[in-house]
Amino acid sequence: MTKLRDKKFYQKSIPILVGLALGILIVAQSNVLPSRVVNPILPYISLKETRDSLYLDQIDLKNEISSLQEKISRIQKENKNLNISKSDLEALLQAKAKAGLTDLSGPGIILTMNDSFGVVSEDSIVHAADVRDVLNLLWGSGAEAITVNDERVVASTAVDCIVNTILINNTRISTPIVIRSIGDREEMARRLTDSSFLVDIHKRVLENGLKFDVQRGENISISGFRGALTSEVSGGGN
């Protein structure tokens, strides 16, 4: 009879002991695991707001630079005592054009690069290295002036990336990447579309759906450089 009572006692005790052990385990884990974000949308909203704020600040700075350059030009024109010969003035204008500080227009090409509309992978998106390869090819094809998403490419221009964001002249740009180039449009178009050039890009166009469209133009507009000229040139990033 005693053995029967002991057996019933143990049977009743087992669920209690298991519950206590489980409770202790849960408490221990709650002290070890880091706190989780309850709403996964909040970090995305925060990042988006930060990005939008940076873009607005960037636009304000560009407008300020443009305004100052216009003010300088106006003062120079209004300065009646400015003594400069015609040859000196022509040399100055030529130097500014070579430095990319003036607006230009003429025959050329418009290249549009974009990420694949299908599955996103390392090979289906546009990288900073792709932009650098295209720019090098264009310069080698006799390009006279180039812009990338309206950012003028000059001697100090750096094409970098931060995570998946491409930077031109320290300006964040996003796809589609539109490259305008003035020069021998037939030669530039021929090299861009020849699969023996830009081999990796053409391979990804065929295999991964990368977008790469070349158009010829009779009167391509190229805006002048609006940033600050520096002697630092970098080309890191993917």
Image: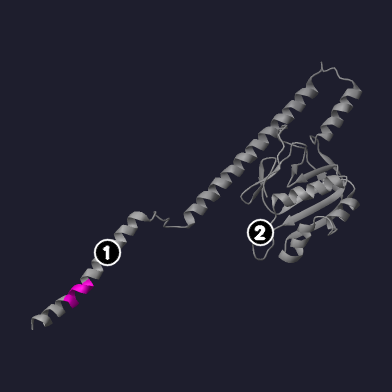
Residue 30, given in percent of the width and then of the height, sits at 33, 57
Name the residue at the left extreme: 1
Three-letter code for the amino acid on which mark 2 is drawn: Glu
| Near-viewer residue (25 or 159) | 25
Real-space CA distance between mark 2 and mark 1, rounded to the nearest whole angstrom: 46 Å
Give the color scheme: rainbow, by chain, secondary structure or one colour. Answer: one colour
In the displayed structure, 238 sits above or below 212; it is: above
Which residue is rendered at x = 71% and y = 41% of the image? Answer: 158
Three-letter code for the amino acid on which mark 1 is drawn: Gly
The reply, left or right, for residue 103 in relation to residue 40 is: right
| Near-viewer residue (89 or 133) | 133
Question: Which contiguous range is marked in magenta?
Answer: 10-15
Q: Quadrant of the N terminus?
A: bottom left
**Disc with the residue nearer the chain's start (2 vs 1):** 1
Say which residue label 2 marks.
Answer: 122
| Near-viewer residue (42 or 8) | 8
Q: What main secondary structure does the magenta stretch of the protein show? A: helix
Say which residue label 1 marks.
Answer: 23
Residue 2, given in percent of the width and then of the height, sits at 8, 80
The reply, left or right, for residue 191 in relation to residue 209 is: right
Which residue is rendered at x = 84% and y = 51% of the image? Answer: 109
- Residue 122, by quadrant, is bottom right
The reply, left or right, for residue 36 in relation to residue 16 is: right
**Magenta span includes 13:** yes
**How many numbered dots are placed on residues in this image?**
2
